[in-house]
Amino acid sequence: MPIYSNTQQNIAEQLSTEKINISKWMDWKWQLRNSIKSVEQFESLLGIEMDEKYRKKIKETLRKFPLSITPYYLSLINSEDYSNDPIFIQSFPSPKELDISPHDMEDPLAEDKDSPVPNITHRYPDRVLLQVSNTCAMYCRHCTRKRKVGDVDSIPLKQEILNGIEYIRQTPVIRDVLLSGGDPLMLSDDYLDWILSELRTIPHVQVIRIGSRMPVVLPYRVTDSLVAMLKKHHPLWVNTHFNHPREVTASTREALAKLANAGIPLGNQSVLLAGVNDCPRIMKSLVHKLVENRVRPYYLYQCDLAEGLNHFRTPVGKGIEILESLRGHTSGFAVPTYVVDAPGGGGKIPLNPNYLVSFSTNKVILRNYEGVITTYQEPDSYESTFCDRKCADCNLQLYLNDAEESRAIGIEKLLADHDRTISLVPKKNERMERRDSER
Ligand SMILES: *Cc1c(COP(=O)(O)O)cnc(C)c1O
């Protein structure tokens, strides 16, 4: 597809009374101003017509979960077979969004609970999410923060963002800050520049990451001036969100190339979605297109238990099957990590097919992607170094100021030589409560 197709020209003409040309179409602010927010407009631009009853149901859905799509993203829909179209399914509401199952949660990842100050989610020891925008160019139907979409469709005030930044400044363990949202690239270049500059005055912030779907839904947002601004704030990483190979177009390629040429490492976080990409061949095609464009497939998410996402969920087995079709079959760096984001806020849990078949004291039995079963002979003489965390007395060399002091937590703690903990026991455990009451 060319960078400006006939379909796009057609859509642009319908949206505008003034004369439209390619440079108007590629103006991201024009795209945002002309975002489609009603069912009728969506239908007329696609040249389709839904039956009256269905449209009524859609409108009910919209009251709870609003609709918004950029003219660009809409132009990628194949109107001949729209109801199966992966772009349509990701952007157009479904009455199924109102089927709330008993397992669904408003805030499945307990982000609101792990929030020490507004706009910050501090879940992991050394990194935080900083929500700098409450809005997006396109409202993904599978959004895990659906509860917030369209709520306060706005950019937080400087003071609110400063409060978040102040928390980061006062918390020296934070070495990695993820700008999230909403979509951080909804902010103007200047506003984003200000946030990044503030963060860069904090010595312990080593890396900054931006999570944005703009390269997918509004690639024209990636302008030369945006990129020139971003590259002043290195080390800066960008993670984007492609779900289907059809989303990779001439325009997205250009956007990705601009970012990569600015030295920004690019990653992709896909969500496994029923009816969109729950297919090993689709996922393989997607990861190939990503690496071709210097984007490293980073995560493949199991769909969250958020309200209104039931119809998008697949069994975990589908994700395992997809990984099975990738690992070994294609370049290692094209294989994402498949994760379940633990309901209740336990963070991301990676899942893999089983490769460890069995083991004894001196042998490990493994299988590869072809089903070949092989033996790895363990070393006869491995002297493990007892670690008491006194690096100065150890023969392994680590300069002490590189030994970042963090307490071992979780399974790492159980494995540690220097810690006497022998088990992790859930807070509410009947057996332990019985012990306590018998005493
Ligand atoms: C995903 C996520 C992160 C980043 O996790 P990585 O595995 O480092 O990419 C940080 N904080 C929260 C709350 C997250 O959900």
Image (tube, rainbow, N blue to C red):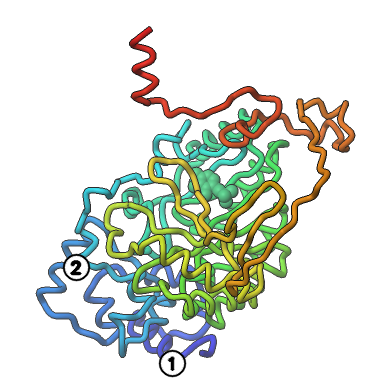
Q: Nearer the viewer, residue 187 or 251?
A: 251
Residue at 53% over, 59% down: 352
Furthest-left residue in this view:
53
Residue 122 horizontal side relative to residue 43, left or right: right
Three-letter amino acid code of the residue under disc 2: Ile
Residue at 79% over, 50% down: 379
Q: Nearer the viewer, residue 187 or 271?
A: 271
Quarter residue 254 falls in = bottom right
Q: Nearer the viewer, residue 352 or 256?
A: 352
Name the mark on residue 243. none
Residue 55 horizontal side relative to residue 229, left or right: left
Q: Mark 1 or 2, which is nearer the eye?
A: 2
Rendered location of residue 319, percent (x, y): 45, 65
Furthest-top residue in this view:
439
Rendered location of residue 346, percent (x, y): 46, 41
Rendered location of residue 40, percent (x, y): 22, 76
Residue 40 horizontal side relative to residue 52, left or right: right
Three-letter amino acid code of the residue under disc 1: Asn
Which residue was labeled with disc 1?
6
Residue at 40% over, 89% down: 7
> Regarding mark 1 in the picture, which secondary structure is present there?
helix
